[in-house]
Amino acid sequence: MNLSTRTDPEVFQALKVGDISALGVLYDRYGGVVYRLALKILANPQSAEDLTQEVFLLLWQKGRYDPTRGSLNSFLMTLTRSRAIDRIRSQGAKQRSIERWGQNLEVLPTVPTPLELASTEERAQRVQEAMTTLPESQRRVLEMAYYSGMSQSEIAQKLNTPLGTVKTQARQGLIKLKRILNDFVG
Amino acid sequence: MDMQPLEMWEELVAGYVLEDLSLEEKKAFDQLLQERPELVAAEIRRLKETLALTPYALPEAIPSPRLRNQLLVAAEQQTAQVIDLSTLASRRSVAWLSWAGSAAAVIALVLVGLDSYRLRQELQTTQEQLAQQQSIVSMLQQTNTRLVTLRSSTPSSEASGNLVVTPSDKDAVLVLKNLAPIPKEQVYRLWAVIKGKKFPCGQFTPDPKGTVFLKLPMEEALVKAPLVVTLEPSLSPSTSAEGPMVMTTDI
């Protein structure tokens, strides 16, 4: 049974019943981008590899990912980001519940979106194009918030910009991205 | 309270997803949520998915190639049970391995990944066996233990397995699972395909769970050559490979 041509939900089903080749397929699909994100936040290849393995082992522990709550991509990115940020903040600083990002509320069950059917290369291309259409200020604030885990007040301070402006920029940036990628995200 | 203008509530939900709502905004958001729960939930999902796409714009970076295998071994370790051989009934034609045997045998047992739910009821796992399992797996990760994967040749079959070879051992270990049961008139045979010819490596019958353990004398050919499992009549000569192909290696 060749899982590599199946959709994420189908492959995940196989993983749930203990098919380890399904884990391999999902690693082939998402390992690169999970690693990329981990590396961006942790800035250390070995730590990024450790985290990548940790994330996929968490996926392997069935019951963690609930397909009705969102795409597999979203689950993996959120998990990777929260673990990575927890690690960089683990030196004494108060832990923020980063994992709450976007996971508080029950979300609607989804049908496979164009996003889920697209390859990693296609996604990269679409997203890179979308990013270039954002005003520089919006993109910068959004990226700072996402990759560093800094609060908006910390960002405002760092950029020497009023908090209100920073908040608007981040929100508008996200909304604009959503609109551009609308057909993709579904 | 009236429904806010579209732009305003869109920003409010974005603020929620970005976790930057002020106290006043939180109140407004809660109100919005109460009035239009499905609308808000759908918008949150869209924003969440959008946010989860941003890492695709990062410059490409590739982890080291060994990470994949390391991950799979670690995952198998989490699900596999160490098997107490004395509790398993012996079957005809199946070669059992002594526990004190090769490291490859232990690794193979770790990798067999049988249905752990069933096994948990039947088997006992001692602390010592678990500790041994840990060290074996770390050895697997560090040495150049070779792992060759076998897959079923027919779409309807779930049969799969591994050939495990550690350089220090004189034996290689073949572990297969989910092999279809066969009548006593038939037997499975393993072949190494070298220069188009099939060389016999052993024959076996699966246990009631469809599992096979086979210890094979260590040969270079076993590691390098493609392997094939066929189904043959039991009474045919051991060099006879007339039957259909059941499993092959990935090579």
Image (cartoon, rainbow, N blue to C red):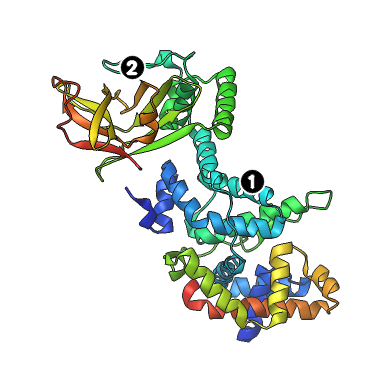
**Mark 1 in CB contact with mark 2 (< 8 angstroms):** no
> Which of the chains bears the disc numbered 2?
B
Circle 2: is it few (<14), some (14-19), or many (20+) Cα within 10 Å? some
* Residue B150 is at least partly visible in this image: yes
The residue lying at 56 percent from left, 34 percent from top is B141
Would residue B193 be found to the left or right of residue B34 on screen? left
Give the residue type at disc 2: Ala
> Where residue B231 sits in the image (x, y, percent)?
20, 30
B33 over A5 or under it: above or below = below
Tell me the tag on residue B195: none
Would residue B40 be found to the left or right of residue A143 on screen? left
**Label 2 residue SS:** loop
**Label 1 residue SS:** helix
The residue lying at 62 percent from left, 48 percent from top is A49
- Pick whichever, A91 or B101, lies toward us: B101
The residue lying at 77 percent from left, 77 percent from top is A166
What residue sits right under mark 2 in the picture? B95
What residue sits right under mark 1 in the picture? A50
The residue lying at 63 percent from left, 60 percent from top is A104
> Where residue B10 sits in the image (x, y, percent)?
62, 79
User: How far is the residue under mark 1 from the one under mark 2?
Assistant: 39 Å
